[in-house]
């Protein structure tokens, strides 16, 4: 599929739901970001639409066959702060309110049965906070799935932490998407590693 068609289809993910696509959202969905990318940083300010961009990305990928429903899994690690964690869940629900997603997503919450429910595999995207899945036993149970994408919200705070590293190593993702309002942290890391 050529880039012009990708852009048209990505914009339709937004417009079909009555939302205006932002250029940076479309640019973060199509083109080189369809190939394995370790990592891709989506840097934008607070309330700029990073979560909606992510919801749209996966709608595009699942709807147009880049990801296979029921097979290819995505782990979306929400922030560990209550208000931001709730915001991610609500943003996904809001984005797909009028036109449902072409994939399924499940939220794993601390202290309830949602983790065990997720092990049925009846989801395409699992939304959680690191603390709800970061034990060797839970990671072993999750390792049976075909994890393709790892998304880290508030990545400037979480990506370099041991918890995030353990999860990524245990589940072996092909794509890593980092959402942050503070992208300079990743620019600095890239410069230091060269």
Image (cartoon, rainbow, N blue to C red):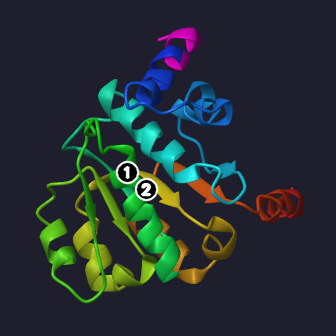
171 to 160, vertically: above or below: above
Question: For residue 94, which numbered disc appears in the image?
Answer: 1
Cβ atoms at labels 2 and 1 below 8 Å apart: yes
Q: Point out residue 21 in the picture as x, y percentages from the top left corner.
A: 56, 30
Span of residues in magenta: 1-7
On the rendered structure, is 45 left or right of 22? Answer: right
Is residue 61 visible in the rendered image? The answer is: yes
Cα gap from disc 2 to disc 1, whole angstroms: 5 Å
Q: Residue at x 88, y 64 (%)?
A: 192
**Residue count near mark 1 (Cα–Cα under 10 Å), binned few <14, some 14–19, many ≥20:** few
95 to 193, vertically: above or below: above
- Secondary-structure class at tag 2: helix
On the rendered structure, is 183 left or right of 162? Answer: right
Question: Which residue is identified by label 2?
Answer: 91
Q: Residue at x 32, y 34 (%)?
A: 62
Quarter of the rendering containing residue 65: top left
Q: Residue at x 36, y 64 (%)?
A: 127
49 to 22, vertically: above or below: below
Q: Point out residue 134 in the picture as x, y percentages from the top left corner.
A: 39, 82
Magenta-drawn stretch contains 3? yes
Question: For residue 47, which numbered disc appears in the image?
Answer: none
Q: Main secondary structure of the magenta part?
A: helix
Q: Point out residue 28 in the picture as x, y percentages from the top left corner.
A: 61, 36
Magenta-drawn stretch contains 32? no
- Secondary-structure class at tag 1: helix
Quarter of the rendering containing residue 58: top left
**Residue count near mark 2 (Cα–Cα under 10 Å), binned few <14, some 14–19, many ≥20:** some
């Amino acid at each position: 599929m050529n880039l012009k068609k990708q852009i048209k289809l990505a914009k339709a993910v937004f417009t079909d739901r009555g939302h205006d696509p932002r250029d940076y959202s479309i640019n973060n969905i199509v083109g080189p970001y369809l190939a394995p990318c370790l990592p891709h940083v989506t840097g934008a300010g607070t309330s700029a639409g990073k979560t909606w961009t992510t919801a749209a990305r996966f709608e595009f990928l699942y709807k147009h066959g880049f990801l296979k429903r029921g097979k290819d899994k995505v782990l979306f690690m929400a922030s560990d702060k209550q208000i931001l964690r709730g915001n991610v869940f609500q943003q996904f629900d809001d984005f797909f309110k009028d036109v449902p997603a072409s994939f399924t997503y499940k939220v794993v919450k601390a202290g309830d049965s949602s983790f065990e429910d997720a092990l049925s595999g009846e989801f395409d995207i699992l939304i959680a906070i690191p603390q709800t899945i970061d034990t060797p036993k839970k990671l072993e149970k999750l390792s049976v799935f075909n994890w393709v994408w790892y998304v880290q919200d508030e990545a400037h705070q979480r990506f370099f932490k041991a918890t995030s590293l353990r999860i990524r190593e245990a589940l072996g993702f092909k794509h890593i998407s980092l959402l942050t309002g503070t992208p300079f942290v990743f620019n600095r890391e890239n410069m230091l590693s060269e």
